[in-house]
Image (cartoon, rainbow, N blue to C red):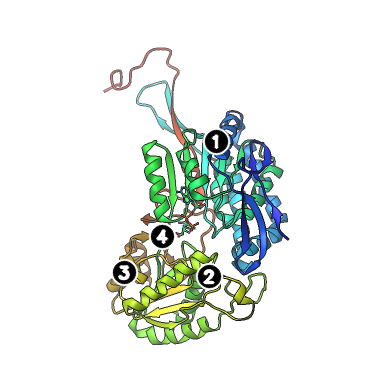
Amino acid sequence: MSKEYKNYIAGEWCDAQSGKRFENRNPADWDELVGTFPDSNSDDVNKAVAAANESYKEWSLVPAPIRGNMIQKAGDILVARKEEIAELMTREMGKVLTETRGDTQEGIDTAYYSASEGRRMFGHTAPSELREKINMVIRRSIGTAGIISPWNFPLAIPTWKIFPALTSGNTVVFKPASDTPATATVFVEVLLEAGIPPGVINIVHGGGSTVGNPIVEHPDINIISFTGSSAVGKLIASSGGRDLKRVSLELGGKNAQIVMDDADVDLAVEGVLWGAFGTTGQRCTATSRLIVQEGVYDKMMGQLIERVDALKLGNGLDESVDVGPIVNEEQRKSVHDYIEIGKAEGAKLSIGGENATGGELDKGWFYKPTLFEDVDPEMRIAKEEIFGPVLSVLKFKTYDEAIDICNNVDYGLSSSIFTKNVNHAFKAVQDIEAGITYVNGPTIGAECHMPFGGCKDTGNGHREGGSSAFDFFTEEKTVYIDFSGKLQRAQIDTEQ
Ligand code: NAD
């Protein structure tokens, strides 16, 4: 059933000041309107930032363990609403229920982890070079955080950002992707029910240029956490850099799974199926390249093509479905454009490569799981992020060649190697240019207490997850306490 969703600004559920709204439809069934949402602009952003700044004065003084208790409660509410949230998420962005339950569970795990950080957020002490003096470092919140998220993890990614931001004492202006605004709104309801005060959390729905950009450029936003494409990330980095804002960017990937001749091939096939076609290939960590050693190539490809062919497409609410739709029309077109590019570049299309149609598939943005073979490392389909159910397969002879192929991209998010040789495994951990390397596992499967992020064009060096997120959302303050009762001048009065 469709619903009229609202913004939440300055403690009130409200429409966009312009009165405009936009629609969100189920990508597996265009006839289903999930809801309509405020189509906001900079007027709404300004109001939200003013409220967040005002609320910051009090919120930043609440003891961190008490803020953590509220986040703990948010985790409990997510547990109670898990099934309802998973179903809504499947309806608004298409991935299958098993995965939307996993997405929600990641939010729950992040809540409990963040709550526990409220009792740590450790600083440190260090000896002073002077007598009767103590040096220490404490952590302080920063101010109002602008949170901008993509649509592929509608709950997990906002929780990775917002739970640490709030636990650390910042206030939040949140702009979710306009493909997944319903899940984001439920998340805000959960935060309010958990006791987060009005004004501390604000959600403003709308587009990237109309809401996202005004958040990024707002002079009273001190810190920005963005997950999305590298193209938009670069714009945000330059604007934020100009105004000396703290900016965390989690961007695209072109992740590879390497399979050595000594690998367990059955396991490697399971891994790549899950890595490449889970979430219909629309994960930043999705396996987009399969790099296979020549000795197991034929065996691996024989099994893989058979398994890909057997994947069941459909509405993700049907528990027997393996692969849901692509998120929207534009994204499906962009995926198909890459199929044409791959064919023109001379790669061999082994399976898929077209819209999936027939029966209920005719009413959704479905695309056949696709494999390209005979891919050259310099082809665009070997180097650019496709963000859909498309896997480019490359063959190699030696370990060094595999690493060269793996690193021959601008991105550096996730990676994996399947091998039973411990030397190859550890060498790959050393040699692969990526923020994450899995050994004998697919390129996807982050855990909330571990740092998450990548190198090269995947980001700007920050990490989400674990205590790294708290490093981002706090600033260090250095404190010197002199209890000598006299003026002691560092460097000058220091004993030599
Ligand atoms: P996108 O960059 O188009 O949009 C991301 C968010 O930014 C959306 O909320 C969008 O409305 C907003 N936005 C767009 N233009 C903006 C602007 N000029 N200023 C401010 N905000 C703006 O990305 P997407 O299509 O939603 O997501 C897919 C991309 O996200 C892929 O590249 C994927 O790899 C990446 N991603 C990365 C991670 C990671 O952690 N590294 C995780 C998930 C997705």
Q: Note whether ligand 1 is within 8 Å of mark 1.
A: no
- How far apart, in angstroms, are the residues tagged by discs 1 and 2? 37 Å
Residue mark closest to the camera, 1 vs 3: 1
Lower sequence index among marks 1 and 3: 1
Lower sequence index among marks 4 and 2: 2
Q: Note whether ligand 1 is within 8 Å of mark 3.
A: no
Q: Residue at x 66, y 45 (%)?
A: 191
Lower sequence index among marks 3 and 2: 2
Disc on res. 413: 4
- How far apart, in angstroms, are the residues tagged by discs 4 and 2? 18 Å
Q: Quadrant of residue 310?
A: bottom right
Element type at mark 1 = helix
Q: In the shown orientation, is residue 94 left or right of residue 277?
A: right
- How far apart, in angstroms, are the residues tagged by discs 4 and 1? 34 Å
Q: Can you identify the residue that label 1 sits on?
A: 46
Q: Note whether ligand 1 is within 8 Å of mark 2.
A: no
Q: Note whether ligand 1 is within 8 Å of mark 4.
A: yes
Q: Position of residue 231 (x, y in %)?
A: 39, 54
Rate crowding at label 2 as few (under 14), some (14 to 19) or many (20 or more) other CA atoms within 10 Å: many
Q: Amino acid at mark 1?
A: Asn
136 relative to 257, above or below? above
Quarter of the picture holding the C terminus: top left
Asked if disc 4 and disc 1 are in contact, CB closer than 8 Å, the reply is: no
Residue mark closest to the camera, 3 vs 2: 2
Q: Position of residue 144 (x, y in %)?
A: 53, 36
Q: Amino acid at mark 3?
A: Ile
Q: Can you identify the residue that label 3 sits on?
A: 403
Q: Can you identify the residue that label 2 sits on?
A: 280
Q: Amino acid at mark 4?
A: Leu
- How far apart, in angstroms, are the residues tagged by discs 3 and 2? 26 Å
Quarter of the picture holding the N terminus: bottom right
